[in-house]
Amino acid sequence: MSASTATSPTPSLYPILLMMIAMVSMPSGAALAKSLFPMVGAQGTAALRLLFSALMLLAYFRPWRVRLTPSGWRVVLAYGLSLGMMNLLFYMSLRTIPLGIAVALEFTGPLTVALLSSRRFADFCWIILAAVGILLLIPRGAEVHTLDPTGMLLALGAGLCWALYIVFGRRAGLHHGTQTVALASTVATVVVLPFGFAQAGTGLFALEVLPWALGVAVLSSALPYALEITVLSRIPVRVFGTLLSLEPVFAAFSGMLFLRETLSLTQWAAIVAIVAASIGITVGNRQPAKARPKSKR
């Protein structure tokens, strides 16, 4: 979802507090989503989260008022496809790797976009630090059974889709307005629903599942969307991006608190390296920029 560039010269405590709430809400929604896996699977959970999110966004933005050209529809379709696959691959990665590690690996997507849009030598140093963090997450020796390679590849795939989501989402938002996020969410739902049905069948819409699925959509989409839009009107985009870089740490703590997931010191060091690289690129990139679309986990 695109938003206008913030113009406030100095952030106050209030928007930072709102941003912290949004960052707690997002991984909490992912932790709640993981608790749905035994009932409808990762694919079913992704489908339900996208379905409820799309319904809320459609009601709010009413995108049927937007008139798109054929080229505009192509961008929206690419936007929606990347959004759907990002969510699907991320939830599938959570089946076998901890939440904090999944978020850290997925975060390489926007980190790569930031790198490719920069020509500063310092940013290439930060990306090396991020690469070191990723290498630290790769199991070695006796640790080979601690992390599932397939889960890690799925999280990296989600990161690639996040990068495409940013590119296509920015293009759609700049030319066709914020209503396109509702259209893209609808496309994402159509793409992922067949995977959900294949996993859970008609149990996807069991009455005992729907309240939890709605909670996932609210925590992962509705609440953080609303808070981040409010924050972006009050603080510079650069500060917003720096705060957002702390998301893998919040995800790791959510995994520990809600899912009883533990990380080794090496894995914590890897997450810190990826976070530091993202903060470094964000702080170093001081040029005015449009706010990036949000990731909806």
Image (cartoon, helix red, strand yellow):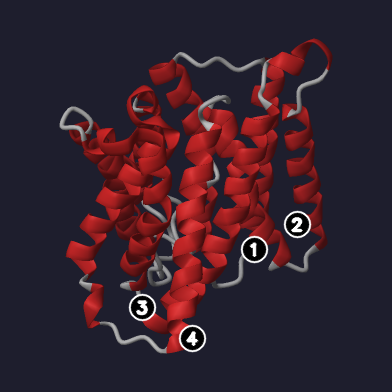
Separation of disc 1 and disc 4 at Cα?
A: 31 Å
First reached walking from the N terminus: tag 1 or tag 4: 4
User: Disc 1 marks which residue?
Assistant: 285
Question: Which amino acid type corresponds to the residue marked 2 in the rendered image?
Answer: Asp
**Rendering coords of residue 114 (x, y %):** 65, 60
Which is nearer the N-term, disc 3 or disc 2?
A: 2
Confirm or deny contact between disc 1 and disc 2 (CB under 8 A). Answer: yes
The x and y percentages for residue 237 are 48, 62
On residue 177, which mark appears?
3
Q: Left or right: where does residue 2 sit relative to residue 154?
A: left
Question: Are the residues flagged by discs 3 and 1 in contact, CB closer than 8 Å?
Answer: no
- Label pair 4/2, CB-CB below 8 angstroms: no
Residue 177 locus on image (x, y percent): 36, 78
Of tags 3 and 2, which is closer to the observer?
3
The percent position of residue 158, horizontal first and vertical second, equals 57, 47
Q: Give the CA separation, mark 3 to mark 2.
A: 30 Å
Q: Earlier in the sequence, mark 1 or mark 2?
A: 2
Q: Amino acid at mark 1?
A: Asn
- Which residue is rendered at x = 79% and y = 10% of the image? 142
